[in-house]
Image (cartoon, rainbow, N blue to C red):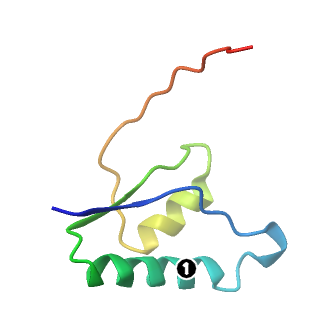
Amino acid sequence: GIRAQIEAVRVREDQRGIGLGEKMFKWAIEKAKERNAHLIQLTTDKKRPDALKFYKKLGFQASHEGMKLHLNNS
């Protein structure tokens, strides 16, 4: 089935707390539903507790543990 992927979401610091992020996510959720997606997924940094709280408020649930390996390609 179709999965929707949400990436690189940012709201400018001086614009936070007025509902812009929630509006964007509700729009994205509706678009995913219109396309019959069965899942919306995103990743976020564990060091962003406000973001985690925000995503949980919207109904997202933690499901996986992610890992990275940074490479020096200079």
| Location of residue 47 in the rendering, given as x and y in whole percent from the top left corner | 61, 43
> Neighbour class for label 1 at 10 Å: few (<14), some, many (≥20)?
few
| Location of residue 57 in the rendering, given as x and y in whole percent from the top left corner | 45, 73
Picture layout, residue 9 above or below residue 63: below
Secondary structure of residue under mark 1: helix
Q: Nearer the viewer, residue 25 or 61?
A: 25
Picture layout, residue 32 above or below residue 19: above
Q: Read off the residue under disc 1.
A: 24
Outermost residue, right side: 14
Q: Residue at x 59, y 54 (%)?
A: 49
How many numbered marks, from 0 up?
1
Q: Residue at x 70, y 86 (%)?
A: 18
Picture layout, residue 20 above or below residue 55: below
Q: Residue at x 68, y 15 (%)?
A: 73
Q: Residue at x 55, y 79 (%)?
A: 24
Q: Nearer the viewer, residue 1 or 46?
A: 1
Outermost residue, left side: 1
